[in-house]
Amino acid sequence: MVFLISNTSFADDNDTTYTYRWGRGLNIPAFNLNLGGYSGISFEHTESDPEAVILDDISFFVSWSPHARIRFFSEFEMENFISSNDGVANFWESFNLERLYVDFLVSDSFSIRLGQFMTPVGIWNKNPIMPLVWTSSRPLVTKSYFFPSRTNGLMLTQQWIINNHNLDISIYLDDSNHLDPRQVNHHQSTYSEVAFKQAIGTSIRYKVNHELDIGLSSLVFKKRMELQQTMNYLIGLDLFWKKNGYELQTEWAYRYAPERLGNEVSGYIQGVIPLGNEIFAVERYELLSGQHQDFYTNFNGVTHIGVSALVWRPFFFLVLKAEYRFGHNNKQLVPSGFFSSISVLF
């Protein structure tokens, strides 16, 4: 999406006032600075693992606009920091630099992004913040094993207005071997997280009307993993519709790689129904078919997954979720079980 800040109001240098609002963070006008974040605690019990209570995320946002056409953004996160089964994790193993980039608004319709940002494939991965998604578990097609969730490099975005609706087209390049700020040793052959080695991708999104927008993604990449340097080709399609509290979203992607890495198709369709009193019912169906690659297994087959959830959002910044995941041929990848969570934007 184009980052529009041309109408930003900048404070007087003598303005020392600041405001804090739940879910909006701490705003400091004198420095054009905003500090915020989110946190979440979850409980899970699956057929493969014992019950666990986990402090999933403690995440901090820093947004700074030194100029009307420039914005810096960073997100620092502690993942799975405390678990009832494993205790307190090592700080450096839990610490994660989620995002760190700068946006330049060249014109009102053209922007440049440089740094580490979420890979713009589909809907979920571009904004996976725990209080803003409907379920505690995320669909398989959005997991980093299907495509790395973060990009380190450059993204160019152009926006057009067609029939009074936005058409955004982005092109991005990644060279994580040299640009990834999380990598300590650039010569190590393995890496603890699925990440790009190199990549080039495009993202196209069109706002059909006030309720509906559609997206198309393409991506060519190599993963930075031992013995996995084959080029991967991915194409994805997504759709999002919302009206009167009802929502429907779907994402589908096809990944192909020659030789032993094979190919797979995966996707989901998810519906949200308001039940009143800020309570929502969420139903999701997922499909994975083909040769799936991750660190732990080389899975080849067809998996069906269902998720049924109840979500209570008493305030826009606070959400409580309870869900049950079930399926066929899913134990090896995402075992059936019960999940619940409480998360808050601050």
Image: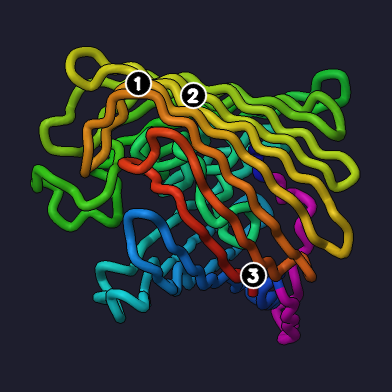
Q: Disc 3 to disc 1, how far (Cα)?
A: 37 Å
Pinpoint residue 36: horizontal percent, then vertical percent: 60, 72
- Mark 1, other Cα within 10 Å: few <14 / some 14–19 / many ≥20: some
The amino acid type, in three-letter code, at marker 3 is Leu
x 67%, y 42%: residue: 283
- Mark 3 — residue? 345
Query: Type of residue at label 2?
Result: Ala
Q: Which residue is mark 2?
A: 253
Q: CA distance from mark 2 to mark 3?
A: 30 Å
- Which quadrant of the structure image shows residue 53? bottom left
Q: Quadrant of the N terminus?
A: top right
Instruction: Check the image and report above or below for 33 versus 183.
Output: below
* Front one among 322 and 188: 322
Q: Which mark is residue 108?
A: none
Q: Which residues are magenta?
A: 4-22
Say above or below: 136 vs 215.
below
Q: Which of marks 1 and 3 precedes in the sequence?
A: 1
Residue 30: in magenta span = no
Dot 2 falls on a residue whose secondary structure is: strand
Of labels 2 and 1, earlier in sequence is 2
Read off the residue under disc 1.
290
The residue sitting at 47% across, 68% down in the picture is 57
